[in-house]
Amino acid sequence: MDQISKLLSLRLSQSVRFLKETGIGITILALFLMTGSILGMIETLLKVNKLYSLVGVASVILIVDRLRTDKNFLNQIFGGKRSMGGYLIVEYLVIFSPLIIYKLIINQYLISLGIIGIVVLLSFITTLITKPTNQGYKRSFKAIPLKYFELKFFVEKKRISFIVTICLLFLGVIHVSLWVLGILILTGLIMEVFASQEPMEMVKWKPNFVLYKIIDYNKIALPILLISSMMTYLRTDLSILVFLYGICAIITAIALAISNKYSEYYGLTDKIKSTIPITIITFLMLLPGFIIVTIGYTILKYRKAESQMKHICSR
Amino acid sequence: MLKIESIKYNFGKNTIFEDVSMQFEAGKVYGIVGANGVGKTTLFRTLAGQYKTRSGKMIWENNPLSRGEISFLPTDPYFYPYMNGGEYLAIVITDKSKLNEAISISDSLNLNLDQIVDTYSTGMKKKLAFIANYIQNRPISIYDEPFNGVDLESNEMLCAFLKKKKEEHVVLLSSHILSMLDEVCDEILHIEEGFKITTYMPDQFQDLKNHIKNKLGI
């Protein structure tokens, strides 16, 4: 029990330190701007069919379990599945407590109990899933040349995410919301693609190195974006400006991710320091008009990146 | 005694080891050496329960081996983001008196426990995870390359801790630094291609060196 409370208080300290690092100002700004859309989403989620909320809870737990990287560590410190399962129950109950309380308030006692039941059941089931930290081998994706190694390595590691995102863009012909969802996910993936730094030996520096890299990646992105946008535009009543805004957002996201990566480049570590503030700024541009702020920030980052690469590589 | 009987592990079609049997006695430090990629880490992860064996048994004192009996220091220990050294020790070590011991060992190894672990060097992270493992006091301790990235003085201290630890425990450790293994190990198991294992006793450690040199023709 003592260990569980220590882990929970660590989770709280982590959040406070994260807020301090990201900057309280930028977090408040992000929350303020996103409140409308988040509240709308929560309202829809809470109103959905009673059974859907149970399925939703189960899906969230399974997705979080798949993504979490601390399972081997938890296994190690708890030394047994029962106590680890106990911790996971408490953690997931804290996450779902607003939903459980809401269901109690609106007199859906059985659904509240159902959610708790699912949390307990899945917490124990997920302790049985062993998750290797190293898959050992990966399949090479030869269609992408080594010049685009960031994308190539990402696709080799997360092939399904990449294929699903590209498919969503083209499925805009069925409904425009699929195209919008594709743009949203692609924006997040771009940050992830450029979250790692290559060793110095892999950098073939030349003047305007960062600019050429941005152009190279946009050469791949633009045809996909233009074709999928055109196909979607022909099947919807939405203004062409929406599609142009989406395309601009992706181009800016690519430029910002690459500039951010090289503005912090020292050739010493394989991960960039923190992508959280950059991710927030990137997602802010998806709100109408905010792209101007993101473009301005990207220009600053780009200038820093070019000067950093010149400083590091031209010696 | 820890007994491994005919265990097998494979990544897809690639079999890392098959039909491997070994025995480890309490009160001894076993060094595991072998070329990169031969399967040392996979063996450790299998023992620690992170990888599931495809067949065979692992037995501790005549009962099936359970996860709670093993403390495992991986090559790259896991730390939560934004966590400091003190918080890490407090989470891993439940016994308060032992926690104080861990804090005093940290002092002797020059670790600042108020510092965020993300900002530690590789060696500092290794030392922190080593202390937590050492203090956990489980009957079987596994250390995967504990000396890597750690400074000379601290390595000497780690050796002293390992010698003390072996008194009531089974200690398994892998390293590529033969001089360190020479200092602490009671037996060295050399794993070669196909998971062929040769055991060397302390008076034969020089033979292991000669065997490697002969193999390389130097």
Image (cartoon, grey):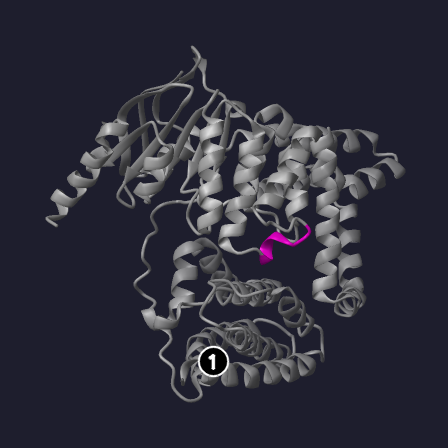
- Quadrant (top left/top right/bottom left/bottom right) for the C terminus of chain A: bottom left
Residue A26 highlighted magenta (yes or no): no
Q: In which quadrant of the rendered view does residue B39 lie? A: top left
Stretch in magenta = B114-119
- Name which residue lies at 32% across and 34% down: B32
Question: For this view, does B35 lie left or right of residue A91?
Answer: left
Q: Give the x, y percent position of residue A57.
A: 68, 40
A246 horizontally vs A132: left or right: right
Query: In the visual, does B33 lie left or right of A87?
Result: left
For disc 1, the marked residue is A214
Answer above or below: position of A51 versus A270. Answer: above
Q: Amino acid at mark 1?
A: Ile
- Crowdedness of circle 1 by 10 Å Cα count: few (<14), some, many (20+)? some
Q: Quadrant of residue A191?
A: bottom right
Q: Looking at the image, is B190 positioned above or below residue A279?
A: above
Which element is circle 1 on?
A: helix
Residue A219 percent across, percent down from the top left: 42, 80
Residue A205 in percent (x, y) is at: 38, 82
Protein chain holding label 1: A
Viewer can see residue A118: no
